[in-house]
Amino acid sequence: MQQLEKILVTRSSMPDYEEYCEEIKKLWDSHWLTNMGEEHVRLQQELEDYLGCQHVVLYTNGHLALENVIAAMQFPKGAEVITTPFTFVSTTHAIVRNGLTPVFCDVDPETYTIDAGKIEELITDKTVAIVPVHVYGNMCDVERIAEIAKKHGLKVIYDAAHAFAVKYKGVSSANFGDASMFSFHATKVFNTIEGGAVCFPNDTLVGTLNDMKNFGIRGPERCVFVGGNAKMNEFQAAMGICNLRHLDREIAKRKAVMERYWQHLDHVPGIRLCKPQKDVEPNYAYFPVVFDGYAATRDQVFDALGEQGITARKYFYPLTNSFECYRDLPTAGTEKTPVAAFLADRVLTLPMYADLAPEDVDRICEIVLACGK
Ligand SMILES: *Cc1c(COP(=O)(O)O)cnc(C)c1O
């Protein structure tokens, strides 16, 4: 039998080897490897331009970016933050590691993002913020969330880890709420190997975030703040500069992959695909499929793909409000978020990356469809 190549759920975008070498060559001249060097400054500027966003503060990863921006808001310990459990654990961890209590809101059955219609019933006199997630690059209902936040005096910090380069009504996802966090992890649409950023529209956070990510040091003999260390280094920034040059082409290739998936899987009874959102320019970050009333369960499809060397991902399963580190919280429990629980049991993200060959998409879909016969 012909040995078919294994397919992983994602494959990191990389520039040509020579292009990256050219970009990092100057580091051998300067010996300046980190601490906001030239590459760092340049990437930050390029991202501000690309995103049309006033302020971008770069980080060594997305998680610390989110943890720091929440800390920068200086909420009182024990205050409540409304978020969703249908996300990567990082979102909930960032809240809890700041001494805050996560309150889990259910998600919308179409977009898998926070159900804005269910936020207000969770607001108490302890609520200080909402941390919604643009899941799979789907935009949250940013307008409704802004209204609710204004009415109740809450901060809004978006976990935009999935939503780099997504636009809503022509405006970058970086420009909603009080701040947004992007992840530039190797598995994301745009990567700096590991990396992340906080983006926000006004000046108030710049100083605090820069202090937080660099020990609160403001000069050789001045330390003004009890900060940590979460700086992006020059090799990461160089990778970002190279990857940003090719990003629009990578996204166009992802679009072609997604269209091929739709050709095979649209209108198959029992298979639900994530519909394009009105007014949204997407980034095609993931390809989630929900098996609801299909002849095979999600787990059966997952196993069938695995047997043929294809790794799909049960993303997001389990929900964060069921993990053992959270399930004893009074606010945890998946019964409080039934839509998220329903999706977590049925969703599978299929392989999705720019260089996924059309024949491979065909092969993946053949296996998925064979499970339904
Ligand atoms: C990737 C991711 C993060 C964490 O980002 P890192 O860069 O890996 O630290 C946070 N939230 C979500 C939703 C993510 O997908």
Image (cartoon, rainbow, N blue to C red):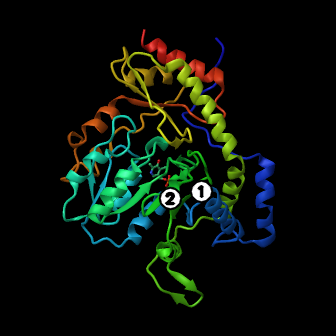
Q: Quadrant of residue 260?
A: top right
Q: Is residue 218 above or below residue 100?
A: below
- Determine if the C-beta at disc 1 is less than 8 A from ligand 1: no
Q: Is residue 237 above or below residue 267?
A: below
Q: Is residue 60 left or right of residue 75?
A: right
Q: Is residue 129 visible?
A: no
Instruction: Tell which circle, 1 or 2, labels the residue nearer the N-terminal end.
Output: 1
Q: Do the residues labelled 1 and 2 touch (CB within 8 Å)?
A: yes
Q: Provide residue 333's location: percent of width, then percent of height.
A: 22, 44
| Disc 1: CA contacts within 10 A as few (<14), some (14-19) or many (>=20) | many
Disc 2 marks which residue?
175
Give the position of the C terminus as an image quadrant. top left
Q: Where is residue 168 in the image (x, y as percent from the top left)?
A: 50, 48
Residue placed at 52% from the left, 67% from the top?
230
Where 301 falls versus 329 (above or below)? Answer: above
Location of the N terminus by quadrant is top right
- Left or right, 253 with reference to 79: right
Spatial CA distance of label 1 from label 2 is: 8 Å
Disc 1, SS: helix
Q: Which amino acid does label 1 sit on?
A: Leu
Which residue is situated farthest in the top direction here? 373
Secondary structure found at label 2: helix
Disc 2 C-beta below 8 A from ligand 1: no
Query: Badge 2, how many Cα within 10 Å: few under 14, some, many 20+?
Result: many
Rendered residue at 28%/36% (across/down)? 339
Image: 41 above or below 237: below
Q: Position of residue 193 (x, y in %)?
A: 61, 52
> What mark, if any, has residue 67 been given in the picture?
none
Q: Which amino acid does label 2 sit on?
A: Asn
Residue for badge 1:
51
